[in-house]
């Protein structure tokens, strides 16, 4: 049996190690999303371990029948109890299991998924790591985030609300990205700050229509799964800020007509923010996570963002609020 191969990286100070008996699986994961993160000191011990089981290495477990299934994640079903978070890709059968007590992720990769593992790994790891990172004081929100002159803007919303379009509009106007889909949050002194979660962006044709400055950047690309893959570095460099204290919460809704902002009461903002956070999978950290979200709403100005056909000019509305 081949020896295990391992590669570690530092994710905001948390040492994550990827392991497998198939060297090409570790290589595929590290050459994709993991390439955004620095390598740790050679003597640093891993705090989270991710093990990829290749097809045929061992029998994959099944999600226990008594656990209710959540199918909000595209193409997958999830379940959780006090010890484990489970994720199964419905069409291919790949199973992932995060041990919430031991900071261990295991993934049993199907033969069908092995062929495009490098593309698949970032999404699987992002979801599961976001849960385990709570053990280290890093909490997640389903949100885009940007930084303008060191001041952070968080844009929480479910899928399809236009987070990537809004983040790209602000990036084109001189802001830096923190994330276009999942932000990490942590308490830093008296403030809540957002941390970068970098990746290449999936840009739909409708976003290109709304942001014409993107057209020359995607002109030579073919859409993959109806989206263009675009590196933010093609727009500006450096595209990502490492972190930013949050000052503004924008809750987007696509709209016809002009883009506009309406002040939102903090209680309503908290009600909108909670469903965008991964709260249910780890009950032990639920209270700490809710406290962080409450403090975040208290420190930020909160707005409903009606994202209209002139969203390319959004910075004209946002920048004065950060002055």
Image (cartoon, grey):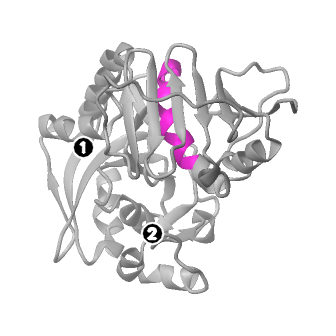
The residue range painted magenta reads 122-138
Q: Residues within 10 Å of mark 2 (few under 14, many from 20)?
A: some
- SS category of the residue bearing label 1: strand
Q: Quadrant of residue 200?
A: bottom right
Query: Of residues 237 and 14, which is closer to you in this image?
Result: 14
Q: Quadrant of residue 220?
A: bottom right
Q: Is residue 153 above or below residue 231?
A: above
What residue sits 62% from the left and 42% below the top? Answer: 109
Position in image of residue 12 (x %, y %): 61, 33
- SS category of the residue bearing label 2: loop
Mark 2 vs 1: CB contact within 8 A: no
- Residue 38 lies left or right of residue 178; in this view the side is right
- Residue 299 lies left or right of residue 285; in this view the side is left
Query: Of residues 230 and 123, which is closer to you in this image?
Result: 123
**Residue 133 in sight from this viewpoint:** no
What residue sits 79% from the left and 47% below the top? Answer: 24
């Amino acid at each position: 049996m081949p020896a295990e191969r391992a590669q570690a990286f530092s994710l905001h100070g948390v040492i994550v190690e990827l392991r497998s008996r198939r060297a090409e699986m570790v290589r595929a994961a590290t050459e994709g999303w993991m390439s955004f993160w620095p390598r740790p000191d050679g003597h640093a011990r891993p705090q989270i371990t991710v093990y990829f089981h290749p097809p045929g290495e061992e029998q994959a477990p099944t999600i226990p029948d008594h656990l209710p299934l959540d199918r909000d994640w595209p193409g997958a079903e999830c379940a959780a109890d006090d010890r484990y978070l489970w994720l199964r890709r419905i069409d291919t059968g790949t199973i992932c299991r995060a041990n919430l007590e031991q900071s261990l992720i295991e993934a049993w990769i199907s033969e069908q998924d092995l062929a495009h593992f490098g593309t698949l790994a970032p999404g699987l790891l992002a979801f599961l790591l976001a849960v385990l990172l709570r053990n280290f004081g890093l909490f997640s929100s389903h949100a885009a985030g940007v930084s303008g002159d060191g001041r952070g803007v968080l844009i929480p919303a479910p899928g399809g609300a236009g987070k990537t379009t809004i983040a790209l509009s602000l990036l084109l106007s001189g802001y830096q990205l923190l994330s276009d889909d999942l932000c990490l949050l942590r308490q830093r002194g008296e403030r809540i700050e957002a941390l970068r979660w970098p990746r290449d962006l999936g840009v739909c044709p409708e976003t290109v229509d709304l942001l014409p400055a993107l057209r020359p950047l995607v002109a030579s690309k073919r859409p993959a799964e109806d989206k263009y893959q675009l590196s933010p570095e093609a727009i500006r460099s450096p595209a990502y800020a490492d972190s930013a204290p949050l000052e503004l919460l924008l809750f987007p809704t696509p709209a016809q007509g002009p883009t506009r902002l309406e002040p939102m009461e903090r209680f309503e903002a908290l009600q909108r923010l909670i469903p965008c956070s991964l709260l249910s999978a780890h009950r032990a950290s639920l209270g700490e996570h809710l406290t962080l979200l409450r403090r975040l709403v208290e420190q930020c100005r909160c707005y409903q963002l009606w994202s209209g056909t002139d969203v390319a000019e959004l910075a004209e509305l946002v920048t004065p609020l950060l002055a």
